[in-house]
Amino acid sequence: AVQLLFDAHPEAICVNDGNGRTLLDIAGMPRLRGRGEENASEVVTFLEAQMAYVRKAQDIIAMQTPDDNNRLPLHHALFNNASLGAIKLLVKGNPLACQVSDVNKDSPLHIACRGGNCGAVKYLLERNTSQVSEQNVGNKLPIHLLCESGQDIVDRESPEFVETIWHLLKAHHETVLI
């Protein structure tokens, strides 16, 4: 439930309640931990990981400085299958990152497709559809990478997968001919 809320409204992780506490503060409170120590621990771990993305998204220099492979924090987050909320924060921190391809000509859309991250694919398509028709160094379109992603990564019979394929085809209907 926490991840669904974070994915929908990632900025809420930084908002304080009426007593000046963040979500991370509240999740770590002893009275909440006592209701399910393991579950509370998972929530705290998740929120701590997301806070790392919050801090990264606020670091303008880090957000705009590519590594040796021309990858930005957005690329790395997609490789690591970060939550949709984290992807949204990183795109907000550097909207132009959606248009940057790495040395393999993989755009963030290519990486999201390769990882079977359907939520990120749909989100990135909403921001920029230009890369849907760009091939990487392996001559693969993003849709090819999504279709090649393993069953252990994505359920190809799920409605989300089918919907994502539909969005990719709709954005670049010539794909059927390639």
Image (cartoon, helix red, strand yellow):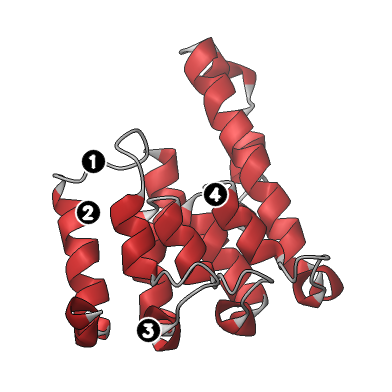
For disc 2, the neighbor class at 10 Å (few under 14, some 14 to 19, many from 20) is: some
**Residue 177: horizontal and vertical position, in percent?**
19, 82
Q: Which residue is mark 4?
A: 82
Sequence order check: which comes first, mark 4 or mark 3? Answer: 4
* Disc sitting over residue 133 in the figure: 3
Sequence order check: which comes first, mark 3 or mark 2? Answer: 3
For disc 1, the neighbor class at 10 Å (few under 14, some 14 to 19, many from 20) is: some
Q: Is residue 163 above or below residue 132?
A: above
The amino acid marked with disc number 4 is: Ala
The amino acid marked with disc number 2 is: Phe
- In contact (CB < 8 Å): disc 1 and disc 4: no
For disc 3, the neighbor class at 10 Å (few under 14, some 14 to 19, many from 20) is: some
**Residue 52: horizontal and vertical position, in percent?**
72, 49
Q: CA distance from mark 4 to mark 3?
A: 24 Å
- In contact (CB < 8 Å): disc 1 and disc 3: no
Asked if residue 34 shows in the view, the reply is yes
Q: Secondary structure at mark 1?
A: loop
Sequence order check: which comes first, mark 2 or mark 4? Answer: 4
